[in-house]
Image: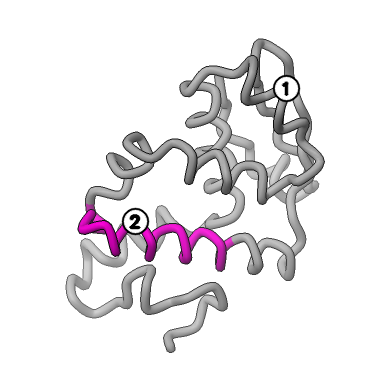
């Protein structure tokens, strides 16, 4: 099961430790530029899911209903992962834990943004307005 990385692990760029099919895999933390590209893929997936009539508020439910989108994003984060082996041996729980771990390092400010939205409702842009660049379009 996924253990949230400590601040020291994040600052030292320690690799993420993910488990698939009972085997542990270490994947590198992406640099800012590569992480930006991955976040753009995340925004595209969210936009596609929204196009299916699923609200961003229900995004977690959408990824449960569409696990292939979540898997695509995990493999996009680290294309070196043995996709065929993982698909054959991993559980959906392991996939969800891996996705959660990746999101925690790719979007490290998410908890802060969630708090800011509570404190200042209606004042901050949503994910769709931010795009992959982190800037309001």
* Rendered image: mark on residue 15: none
Give the residue furthest to the bottom: 137
Please give the name of the residue rendered at 29% of the width and 64% of the height, measured from the top-left corner.
51
| Residues tagged 2 and 1 counted as in contact (Cβ below 8 A) | no
Verify whether residue 43 appears in magenta. Answer: yes
Q: Mark 1 Cα within 10 Å, few/some/many (few <14, many 20+)?
A: few
Residue 100: image location, x then y, percent:
50, 38
Q: What residue is rendered at 48% in x and 45% in y?
A: 69
* Quadrant position of residue 101: top right
Q: Which residue sits at x=21%, y=72%?
A: 120
As displayed, is residue 109 above or below residue 77? below
Tell me where residue 122 sits by quadrant. Answer: bottom left
Picture quadrant of residue 94:
top right
Q: Is residue 100 above or below residue 56?
A: above
Residue highlighted by disc 1: 85
Marks 2/1: CA–CA distance: 27 Å
Q: Secondary structure at mark 1?
A: helix
Task: Answer with left or right where residue 101 lies relative to residue 23.
Answer: left
Residue 49: give its label.
2
Give the residues drawn in magenta, as a range.
39-57
Q: Quadrant of the C terminus?
A: bottom left
Q: Nearer the viewer, residue 6 or 44?
A: 44
Q: Nearer the viewer, residue 69 or 27?
A: 69
Q: Seen in the image, is 135 located left or right of residue 21?
A: left
Helix, strand or loop for disc 2: helix
The tag earlier along the polypeptide, 2 or 1, is 2
């Amino acid at each position: 099961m996924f253990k949230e990385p400590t601040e020291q692990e994040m600052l030292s760029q320690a690799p993420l430790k993910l488990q698939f099919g009972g085997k542990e895999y270490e994947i590198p933390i992406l640099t800012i530029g590569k992480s930006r590209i991955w976040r753009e893929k995340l925004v595209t997936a969210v936009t596609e899911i929204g196009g299916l009539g699923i609200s961003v508020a229900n995004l977690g439910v959408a990824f449960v209903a569409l696990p292939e989108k979540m898997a695509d994003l995990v493999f996009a984060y680290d294309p070196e992962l043995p996709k065929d082996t993982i698909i054959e041996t991993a559980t959906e729980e392991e996939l969800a834990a891996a996705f959660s771990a990746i999101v925690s390092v790719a979007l490290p400010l998410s908890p802060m943004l969630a708090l800011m939205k509570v404190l200042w409702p209606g004042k901050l842009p949503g994910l769709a307005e931010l795009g992959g660049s982190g800037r309001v379009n």
